[in-house]
Image (cartoon, coloured by chain):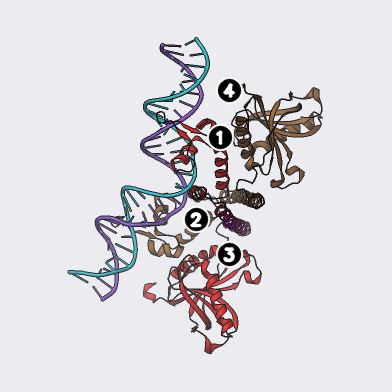
Chain colours: A brown, B red, C purple, D cyan
DNA sequence: CATTGACCCTCCCCTTAGGTCAGGCTGTAT
DNA sequence: ATACAGCCTGACCTAAGGGGAGGGTCAATG
């Protein structure tokens, strides 16, 4: 029988933490004196507490941990650990990406002396976009689903003996061009005009090229929207992005390139 | 002049976020209608908002960001970015370590079928520890300060022409053996008995070897304390750990070894 | 001109994993 | 008997917003 103080020292957690774990039912003392309210722990609970600490270090929330321990099935725990490992790998990769972005930002700053200089140099121009013959898949989705839906398109291409012309892109219909979840159409260009889902008619577009990882794509959208506003144009249709240089070219995220097209029309002079 | 809704879509942040940034003074609209309370943003503020998003991605808190932007000195920002990069590198390394620990845990689980099996196999035994002739440095400190204080000891050794015998360790006087901050004495074994700060007399100790990174040292302490309790012994002095295999041997964290000694005495039979 | 629907406002409570007092018991040693 | 260490509960705090209630505003339509 250990008091909270003793137990907290052995496990190296604060008394407050033990109070909290008691409250949320994660680690309940074996005995609580009904008069004084004093908590007493068993020395076997040290092991439990250490496991909790370990799972916390693995990135589980206390709620996850409680559920895992209450379930008591080792296979469930094993599966959860495997999933968590995947998640940690993803987080690590994202952290690496952030570091690379930050490095690029620093280099750019040293070169240009401009703190916004990571890519303020978006060259924006109005051009007539070419016609594009594509097959397409339109859904509510987020960037994370791109892989799945692109696979679907490529599968269809294989089945129907279509020839890709190298173009891949996405159209944002929600005027939020939100990469997390919105009404997005993925497109893949093909050579066979007659078998295409549609032909995207070449329109007048404000366009620019974004260099770097997709996490900073919103910079390019921001720059474009501001430019359109300031140069007397107005949106006129769903914007889309074409992936010109990607990981499939064996490139690192900082070397990827994405060209963004915003269909626009000239605003009447009166409005300008 | 953009309304919150427009601004939020362009920058891809929620209206709630914009309200919040306004409230904390991070990004204040250029105009707020005094009657309706409507917020209006300038298209130049898009750039500002994107910079904020970028800094957030680099891991700065909103408070840090506000201070950095208010200061407006690019050199300060540059320095902060450099520091942040260091911090991110550290976080990445820690994440890698967690992943390695988790992998080891999974392997151990597969091997032993015991979910606590990452290292439950602490072989604990009572032994008479050897005498140790050491120089020592005792302070309130945490693990993070070990490097500094060890450097001090090695410097002294060089100045006084002392010969290290390869032993390095730490004594925990606070009976909390808290690695974050407590009354810790670092020791380095030397050959010259006459010039030593002290000789640690070999006592009866419960001892075990912890294999793996220091983050899981508390497991070993927990196991030892439980064992002592259950086997009719009682603490009798400050526990210490000796670093037998470390990074200085060119090893990865999961191969490090630390031997932990707990001075003990047999409890009278009546108490058992 | 009135209404509809989209858009906007403030205010309040909720989230994680506890930390930090304040005020008041309890247990043990002297 | 008293001192002091240890323990209790309860209230309020953190960061970065999310969710919803209840109500006002804007622009276009009938």
| Nearer to us in this view, A253 or B249 | A253
**Magenta-span inclusion, residue B90:** yes
Residue sitting at 53 percent across and 70 percent down?
A: B146
Main SS type for the magenta part?
helix
Residue B46 in percent (x, y) is at 56, 38
Whole-angstrom CA distance, mark 4 to mark 3, is: 67 Å
**Mark 4 nearby-residue class (10 Å; few <14, some 14–19, many ≥20):** few
Which numbered dot is residue A52? 2
2 or 3: mark nearer the eye: 3
Residue D17 is left or right of residue A99, and the answer is left
Q: CA distance from mark 3 to mark 1?
A: 51 Å
Q: CA distance from mark 1 to mark 4?
A: 17 Å
Q: Which of the image's four quarters has the C terminus of chain B? A: bottom left
Position of B132 relative to B171 (above/below): below
Judged by depth in the image, the label closer to the viewer, 4 or 3, is 4
Magenta segment boundaries in residue numbering: B78-106
Q: Is residue B214 above or below residue A139?
A: below
Q: Position of residue C14 (x, y in %)?
A: 41, 41
**Residue to which mark 3 is pinned:** B213
Picture coordinates of residue A230 (x, y %)?
60, 31
Question: Between tags 2 and 4, which lies in front?
Answer: 4
4 and 3 marks on the same chain? no
**Chain for numbered disc 4:** A
- Picture quadrant of residue B244: bottom right
Give a yes or no on whether discs 1 and 4 share a subunit. no
Circle on res. B43: 1
Query: Please, is residue A9 above or below residue A110 in the view?
Result: below
Residue under circle 4?
A271
What mark, if any, has residue B169 been given in the picture?
A: none
Answer with left or right where residue B147 lies relative to residue C24. right
Q: CA distance from mark 2 to mark 1?
A: 49 Å
């Amino acid at each position: 029988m250990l008091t909270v103080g003793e137990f907290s020292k052995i496990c190296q957690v604060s008394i407050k933490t033990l109070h909290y774990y008691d409250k949320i039912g994660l680690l309940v003392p074996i005995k609580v004196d009904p008069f004084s309210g004093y908590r007493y722990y068993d020395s076997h609970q040290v092991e439990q507490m250490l496991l909790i600490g370990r799972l916390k270090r693995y990135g589980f929330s206390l709620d996850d941990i409680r559920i895992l321990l209450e379930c008591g099935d080792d296979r469930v725990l094993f599966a959860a650990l495997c999933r968590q490992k995947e998640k940690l790998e993803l987080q690590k990769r994202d952290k690496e990406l952030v570091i690379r972005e930050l490095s690029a930002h620093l280099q750019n700053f040293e070169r240009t002396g401009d703190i916004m200089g990571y890519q303020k140099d978006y060259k924006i121009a109005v051009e007539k976009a070419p016609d594009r013959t594509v097959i397409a898949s339109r859904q509510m989705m987020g960037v994370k689903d791109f892989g799945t839906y692109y696979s679907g398109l490529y599968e269809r291409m294989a089945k129907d003996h279509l020839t890709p012309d190298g173009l891949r892109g996405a159209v944002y219909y929600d005027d939020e061009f939100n990469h997390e979840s919105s009404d997005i159409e993925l497109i893949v260009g093909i050579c066979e005009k007659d078998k295409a889902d549609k032909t995207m008619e070449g329109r007048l577009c404000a366009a620019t090229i974004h260099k770097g990882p997709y996490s900073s794509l919103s910079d390019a959208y921001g720059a474009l929207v501001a430019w359109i506003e300031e140069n007397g144009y107005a949106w006129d249709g769903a914007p889309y992005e074409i992936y010109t240089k990607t990981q499939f070219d064996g490139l690192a995220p900082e070397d990827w390139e994405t060209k963004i097209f915003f269909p626009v029309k000239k605003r009447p002079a009166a409005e300008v």
